[in-house]
Image: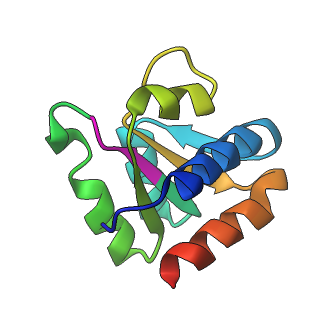
Amino acid sequence: MAEISKEIVDKIYEAIEVAKATGRIKKGSNEVTKAIEKGTAKLVAIAKNVNPPEITMHIPLLSKEKDVLCVEVPSKEELGAAAGISVGTASIAIIEEGEAKTTVKDIIKKLKE
């Protein structure tokens, strides 16, 4: 996974917040894995500071196999906060973008360049 800029990380958190409010997201490694396998995930974010790393190790590989963009963000606490939960989360999948549709498209476009 390539290193992404702070600007894109902020856009990812913003997209998750908007999708949480107007669309649907899945939180946690198990739910995210199921969403990728079912082909419903549009964008996947995993936290870099997950301990042990084995919790999310399979997600980038599965995402690549299913052609879903998977990005790594620095903090599971910030990822959890963006998802509207009071604890950190290892991963998030955006299932329905809602009003974040253009933001998600921008993120995907910038990262595929």
Q: Residue at x 48, y 59 (%)?
A: 5
Furthest-top residue in this view: 86
Q: What residue lies at 30% left-to-right and 66% top-to-bottom?
A: 1
Q: Does residue 103 belong to the magenta stretch?
A: no
State the image quarter where residue 42 is shown: bottom right
Magenta segment main secondary structure: strand
Residue 107 visible in image: yes
Q: Is residue 94 left or right of residue 45?
A: right
Instruction: Give the answer, above or below, for where 79 lies relative to 101.
Output: above
Magenta span covers which residues?
Answer: 45-49
Q: Is there any visible trace of residue 41 in the rendered image? A: no
Left or right: 93 in relation to 72: right
Q: Position of residue 84 (x, y in %)?
A: 64, 25
Residue at (39, 34) in percent of width and height: 75
Is the residue 2 above or below the residue 97 in the image?
below
Q: Looking at the image, how many numbered discs can be counted on the residues?
A: 0
Give coordinates of residue 95: x percent, y percent. 63, 54
Q: Residue furthest bottom?
A: 113
Percent of width and height locating residue 11 = 64, 52
Here the colouring is rainbow
Residue 21 percent coordinates (x, y): 79, 36
Q: Nearer the viewer, residue 100 or 68?
A: 100
Task: Answer left or right for 15 relative to 59.
Answer: right
- Residue at 68% across / 70% down in the picture? 106
**Residue closest to the eye, 42 or 75:** 75
Along the horizontal axis of the image, is 45 left or right of 19?
Answer: left
Does 31 appear above or below 98? above
Magenta segment includes 47:
yes
